[in-house]
Image (cartoon, rainbow, N blue to C red):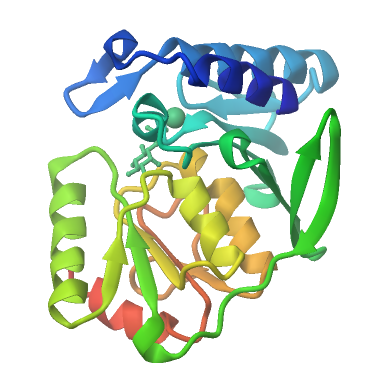
Amino acid sequence: MLKAGRFALKEYDGFNRRKVGLKSKREIITKVDLGSEKILLTSLRKNCPETGYISEEAGSKRRDNKAIWIIDPIDGTTNYSIHNPLWAISVGLAVKNEVVLGMVYAPALNEFYVAEKDKGAYCYRVSGSKLVNRKKLIISGVDHDKIIHTFCHGSSMHDLQVAMKYYKYQKTHGLDCRQLGSASLELAYVAGGRVESIMIPGANSYDVSAGALLVREAGGRVTDFFGKKWTLQSKDILASNGKIHGEVVRITRKL
Ligand code: IPD
Ligand code: CA
């Protein structure tokens, strides 16, 4: 991941938005998504040849049903393309359908988030090829009137409409609600107590698997829009500091 991060960061400064391609009407792709993915998959094939993967651009290769890497080589490509530093490389490892390792690396912020199941969640700085300055991630406990919600959405019109209804509800009820543009980092921000929640209708597993574990391991709650435990098969995801979860589910269940 550090190598992929170095590559993405090298391209970042001089990146020209005219180089962006279109995967579909609402989805963009750049040579940085493909280059980062190539570095990650080459390393995984060499070091973990027995383990399958699902990766946003390359698709999936399943070798058995026991363990699988879940990869987004650049999460927040639009942010990347406009020189907004909120973009990340997201890698999760699921064993028997359960995420046991989650890593979200934001090179332009120099933040490397890691969670292992039952072992907590941490944020490191990267110094050369080392992870230094370990800080434990703990979800926030701010008062009600200071709460900040975040949201993003999948690519279908339905996902977009659900997200818009949610945004309208929160804003018209006097609450702060923002789209930061990188699902994995928004989850890392919930884990680190920078914001209180993130909701995503139509979430892709590669955008959220690593971040979901960060939130759980930092003491937060991760469910679908009805408050049922989030799994890799869930269509939607709601992650929060736990304290406000019920309050948000009361909104998301009606969307
Ligand atoms: C996107 C970002 C965005 C979210 C989209 C994702 P990408 O990831 O996470 O915040 O709204 O649903 O697809 O395309 O930049 O990897
Ligand atoms: Ca991506």
Query: Could you tell me which quadrant the C terminus lies in?
Result: bottom left
Q: Nearer the viewer, residue 66 or 143?
A: 143
Which residue appears at 34% of the width and 29% of the height?
82
The answer to whether residue 44 is left or right of residue 175 is right
Q: Nearer the viewer, residue 66 or 71?
A: 71
Which residue appears at 62% of the width and 24% of the height?
62
Q: Is residue 83 above or below residue 126?
A: above
Residue 210: horizontal and vertical position, in percent? 61, 48
Residue 19: horizontal and vertical position, in percent? 33, 9
Q: Note whether residue 7 is visible.
A: yes
The answer to whether residue 238 is left or right of residue 151 is right
Which residue appears at 71% of the width and 28% of the height?
1
The answer to whether residue 254 is left or right of residue 49 is left
Residue 16: horizontal and vertical position, in percent? 35, 13
Q: Nearer the viewer, residue 20 or 85?
A: 85
Q: Is residue 61 above or below residue 175?
A: above
